[in-house]
Structure formats: structure tokens, C-alpha cells
Amino acid sequence: MGNGKYDFGMVGLGVMGSNLLLNMADHGYAVVGFDLDEAKAKKFESSGKEGQQLKGVTTAKDLVDNLKSPRKIMLLVPAGKAVDSVINGLEPLLDKGDIIIDGGNSHYTDTLGRINRLKNSGIHFMGVGISGGEEGARRGPSIMPGGDKEAYKVVEPILQDVSAKVNGEPCVAYLGNNAAGHYVKMVHNGIEYSIMQLVSECYDLMKNGLGMSNDELAETFGRWNSGEMNSFLLEITAEIFKKKDPDTGGYLVDVISGRAGAKGTGKWTSQSGLDLPMPVPNIDVAVMMRNLSGLLSERKEASDIYNIKEQQLGSAAEKEEIVKAIHDTLYFATLLSYVQGLAMITTASGELKMDIPLEDVVKVWRGGCIIRSASLDHYARIYHENPGLKNMMLNKEIAGRLEDTLPAVKKVITLAAQNNFQIPGIMAAFNYFNAYRRNWLPTNLVQAQRDYFGAHTYERIDKEGVFHTQW
């Protein structure tokens, strides 16, 4: 049994791990961090304030020996083999009732495997999504726990204390069975990909289609952030346009390469959507565009061959009207990004037997996380009133908001198409909206084709059964 004096342990003293422990120390918890890098362990131990109890260690045994029972240990290490390696090292040192928490960006299928492997060991295992980056970890992240409910009850007070708060409510809640925590975090990241893609498309339209300066862009995104679209991503976007580059003296954004990186969580979301199946075209497109951005040398060659030039979207007199249309289009497409992601979680909740409470998911996202926005309070109310809602597009209030912005969306799509701008995210949202609200889709022809060449059969609209025709 653990007879140490520390309340919580962390494996991995990188920026996220050390900041989260410092956050806990600020709330009066005695914490111990383990890292193989002795310099990191010493730096962590010396970084506390007077009166705080912090300890840095370099062996798993020292970590375990310093913790109270039941031991509570979080892993913030790279997803994949590193997580399994740490678990394998900890398992023989732990007692029944001790708790291991994977707080990294693990794939939910890996989390399921670890739950099954440890379920008869007596050691509790939880997958917990954490969002907010280094600042969130230090000041209050959004925390998405799932899995072992008994273990959650033990760590709940600590997680509530260190999480972000909105209207006094902690941005943490038990989000369901099995790998629910990591599944919700995966979809969170997919929505994040989608919104970032949409914001970049609006930036392109305003910078290259309207000739707006970085100062104007900073003012515009800042103004949008002060209204109904208030969100973390718009807030940081406005700040990015203000940042000067110390090397050139110009604006930093103008010297950053367009080759976008990715950690894989957006791709996982897209893959899971295909597997369910549940369409999330905005996330699919966002992943695709990051991949396309990597084809830099090919795109340069193609640019020389096709010599396409983006044209101005309108005259100076029309600028204000077009900017307003872009604002409404971003609102429309961002809303549909949440619609798609939440519909995916709803479906996965049943299909994967996770029993995820959608209202709690939305509430947890209101503070601390990357996709936090003012709209989430509204979405939480919708799910509170109708917990079984399959898709927010079926809510009349949401339908009204989408329809109100539709003229602006059509205007922006038309202007972009006429003037050689690519807006795949906006188009994905528009096509999803149009397809989802139609009673009839031309996929009856697809079924006929499949039956013609592969005898795959089809259903009819006038009688029950499955049919095949000799075409």
C-alpha cells in the first residue's frame, strides 16, 4: 500500500505535464512528477511557490513510493508505444485500487485495448482527454474523462479544482463508458481542424480577394470575436495578425510557410466517421487540405502551368457588404462543424456502447479548450431540452439560424468561384446542409448502378424487400 505523502503523480514533465502539476499545487495538492530526464525533474521540483509540496523523481519506483493510496498517476507522454511502455513499468509496482490515467492524445481504440488488458488486474485505468495547450494546463483546461466510473469518483475533486470554470461550473464531467473520454477529445480535435480551415479560407478571401491589410484583418477578426461568434480561435487569429517578425520587421504571419502540420487526431476523426458511418465532410476536407498543403513543390509547378490569378471579389464600395457576408458564412460553416462532430459523438455513443451525455460534452467544451465559444451555451441548452437529439439540424432554432445566413453563404460561394478562390471547407458545409435537408438524393441511381454491375441489390420506395434486376 502507498504510504507516501503526495496526492497525485505525473509521468512526463514536459510543458503539459509540469504545468498541470503546478496547477494542482496551486490548489493545495502535494504532487510528484517522474521524468527520465534528471534536469526536467530538478527544474520541476524547484519551480513551485513557497509552501507548495512538489517533488521530482527519475524512477517509476520513486514515483510510486511517494504517493498516497489509492495512488493516482497520470501519463502525459506521446501516444502509442510510449504509453504501453509506461503502463508495463508501473503495473508490477502498483496495488489493487490504484489508478492510472492516460491524459495524452491516445487513439480511442488503443484506450479500449488497455482497458481490457487491465480490467482483471485490480488496477483502474482511465482515458482522459485534456485540451487547452500549455496555458490551459497551467490555468485551467477542459478535461474529458471516460471509462472507469469508480476511479473517476476518486479523482473527480482534483480534476474539478484544476479545470477551467464557466459561470462557476468546472469544465470537467464524466463523459461515458470505455474509451469515451478519448473519443470525445478526438472529435473535439476534428472540429478544431474544421474551424481552423474555415478561418483560413475567410482570411484568404479578405486578404487576397479584398486586399485587406494585416491591421484590417486583426481589427475584423477582433470585432467578430466580440460578437455572437466569440471564440478562442477567433481571439488568437486577431492576435496573430498583430505580431511583428523580429528578423524582418514585417508581420510574422507573412513569412510563415503554408505547409501545415498535423498530429493525426483529425485523421482519426475522419476515419472513425467513415467506419461508423457518420458523415463529417468538414473534418474530412480539413484533413485533406493539410495534406494538400504539403505538396508544396507540386503546387508551385502547377501554379506556373495554369497561371491562375485570384481576382478582386468586388469594388471598394462593396467591401463592407462582402466582409459581412464572409462573417455570416463563417458563422454558418462553423455551426455546421459542431453539428457534424456532435452528430458523430451521438452515433458513436450508441454504436460503441459509451453512453456519452451530449449536454455534458458541450458544457465541458465551454472553457479551457481550443474550440470554446459563446455558442456552446446555446448548444448545451438544446441538448438539455432534447437529450436524444440525433443532429442539431433537426432543432428548429438552429434551422432558423442556418437559413438566415444562407443568402450570404451563396453570395460568398459565387464570388469565390467566379474569382478563382478555393473554399473547400465552406463548400463542404454548404453541401452537407443541402444534402441533409433533402428528402430525396440522387443515390437511387448509385444503387441501380451497383446492382447493374455487381448484383448488389436495392430497395424500392413502393414496397418492402430487397430486389435485384437482370439489367
Image (cartoon, rainbow, N blue to C red):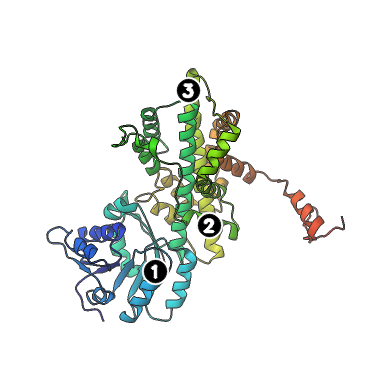
Circle 3: element type: helix
Residue 451 on image: x %, y %:
79, 57
Q: Identify residue for label 3.
A: 319
Task: Confirm or deny contact between disc 3 and disc 1 (CB under 8 A).
Answer: no
Label 2: which secondary element: helix
Circle nearer the viewer, 1 or 2: 1
Q: Is residue 114 above or below residue 377?
A: below
Q: Position of residue 288 (x, y in %)?
A: 54, 48
- Quickly name the residue at label 2: 346
Reading the chain from its start, which is encountered first: label 1 or label 2? 1
In-image side of 28 versus 156 (left or right): left
Residue 83: mark in rendering:
1
Which amino acid does the dot numbered 2 rest on?
A: Thr
Marks 2 and 3: which is nearer the front? 3
Q: Amino acid at mark 1?
A: Val
* Residue occupying the far right of the picture: 470
Spatial separation of the CA atoms under disc 3 and disc 1: 52 Å
Which quadrant would the C terminus be assigned to in this image? Answer: bottom right
